[in-house]
Amino acid sequence: MIKVVAIVGPTAVGKSALGLKLAKKFNGEIISGDSMQIYRNLDIGTAKDSPQELTEVPHHLVDICDADQRYTVKDFQAKAKTIITDLSADNKLPLVVGGTGFYLSSLVNNLNLGGKKDDNKYRQELVELEKSGRIDKLQAILKDEDPLAYQKIDIENTRRLIRAIEVIRSTGKSITEQDNGDKWADFYLIGLTDDRPKLYQRINDRVDKMVQMGLLDEAKYVYNSRDKFPQAKNGIGYKELFPYFEGQASLESCLDEIKKNSRHFAKRQFTYFRNQMDVDWYNISDDKNYQTDIETNILKFLGGQND
């Protein structure tokens, strides 16, 4: 069976750096499991690897869409499965790196996301509601058609709302009760975590570094195109700066909001992966030899075929 290693965990914990090291050691290639790194010209706020790092190891599902294009978990699942299958056939180790929980779950659990690829029967109606800002209407539809999902998913996330509605309409089953499909690959999930104060400091430091790298210009680009960027405009690191561009808030307060929302996001990520997936966790502060331990466990997972 195809062997896949995935690196998960909260934002800013060091997933990308570990992915690069493991890819070099195990003849691997990286598949981004991040829902925002697919977009071209959005590099700083999405924390993409540097241009040099992107050339050191082949990366997939990075810079594949313009920001005005829609991209769904179903798109990710289909593309990632094809890439993983091709890499395995070439004796390359597929390394999925990213913190978008539902993306990883769609792969690991082979979720049936419903509908045909070209089935737009319901999508246009839902997308129009999203464009008009009627999240309340989307929430009402989901509450009526799938009350279980309404209680369990993030109902402030329009993409999750739309996907949950599509799945219940296409399959007749709640997205929270999807049966796993036939197992198509064997996954080893590596989870990185850190003591909370240290993780939060890493997040704060990364936001400061992003500002130095030009985050404001990138966020202004998103702000100026927000009517055309339905998904990117809601990204953490961009939306918090809109009040600054409008003269409604100070830069300092907006940056504090980015840091706060990033910390909250990190907490949600950890909770999701801890509760929803079978992850082998490593605390990067408690275990000074965590990278060596990870490499040893990958060798066991692969059956010892790598040195």
Image (tube, grey):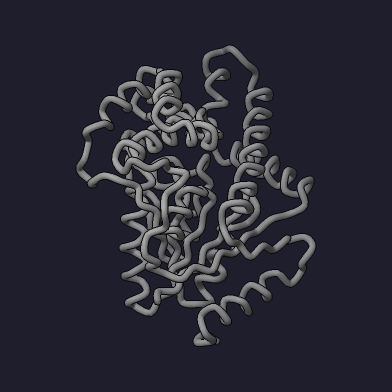
Please give left or right for residue 238 compared with residue 79 in the image. Answer: right
State the residue in front, 131 or 65.
131
Q: Quadrant of residue 124?
A: top left
Query: Residue 130 at x, y = what percent?
Result: 37, 24
Name the residue at 46% across, 77% down.
27
Eyeballing the image, is 280 above or below 37? below
State the residue in front, 220 or 232.
232
Name the residue at 56% across, 57% down.
277
Query: Residue 187 at x, y = what percent?
Result: 49, 68
What quarter of the picture does the N terminus occupy? bottom left
Name the residue at 41% across, 61% down.
59
Question: Is residue 209 in view from this perspective?
Answer: no
Query: Residue 11 at x, y = what percent?
Result: 61, 47
Question: Is residue 254 in view from this perspective?
Answer: yes
Q: How many marks?
A: 0
Query: Residue 244 at x, y = what percent?
Result: 57, 19
Eyeballing the image, is 201 above or below 297? above
